Image (spheres, rainbow, N blue to C red):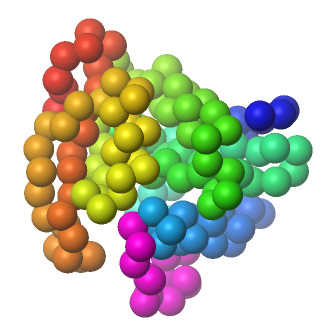
Amino acid sequence: MTDLTLAPFEADRLDELVGMWRACFEFGVGVKDPNPIAEQRQAFLDRVLPNNALRMALRGDELVGFVAASPGSVDQLHVRVGCHRQGIGTQLLDWAKAQSTGSLWLYTFDRNRRAQAFYEHHGFVILERGFEPTWQLDDIKYGWSTAGRRSA
């Protein structure tokens, strides 16, 4: 990994970020998103951005990932398709952990084995299994804490 910078969200990169978010989701979950990209863009502006701190992972000027997290949870963490296993996700997750209250929770889909392995490698444990009604897919709630205990 070379010269990775974590930077605050820049509004002029919105379309690029949302496009990457969609591609990462489709790759990780194996589902084609049938919704218009404009709806995902609006969801980002209405739900993700106002409720989370956001960091973009930049390699030079290339957007290679992002994380949206609050002090208690990780809402989104995505690494550009083709850029996995280069430490990008680790740096983004480390940032989320550092700005947390000492514990975090997050959801991932059961079929996203790459994400499960990543989070478990970084100390997250399964808290519960459930079902996400929008996508009609099984999901997993993970928790992490500085004390190494289960957290909700």
The residue located at (50%, 33%) in the rendering is 93
Q: Is residue 8 visible?
A: no
Q: Is residue 37 left or right of residue 118?
A: right
In which quarter of the view is residue 1 placed?
top right
Q: Residue at x 61, y 41 (%)?
A: 85
- For image coordinates 19% across by 16% down, the residue present is 149
Question: As drawn, which residue projects farthest toward the right?
Answer: 60
Magenta segment range? 29-42
Vertical placement of 138 versus 84: above or below?
below
Q: Position of residue 13 (x, y in %)?
A: 74, 62
Q: Image quarter for residue 146? A: top left
Q: Residue furthest top?
A: 147
* Front residue (pair 23, 71): 23
Is residue 36 found inside the magenta-colored segment of the image? yes
Task: Count the marks.
Answer: 0
Give residue 81's position: percent from left, percent from top. Answer: 63, 60
Which quarter of the figure has residue 102? top left
144 and 123: which is toward the camera = 123
**Residue 142 in view, yes or no:** yes
Image spot of residue 31 (x, y percent)? 40, 78
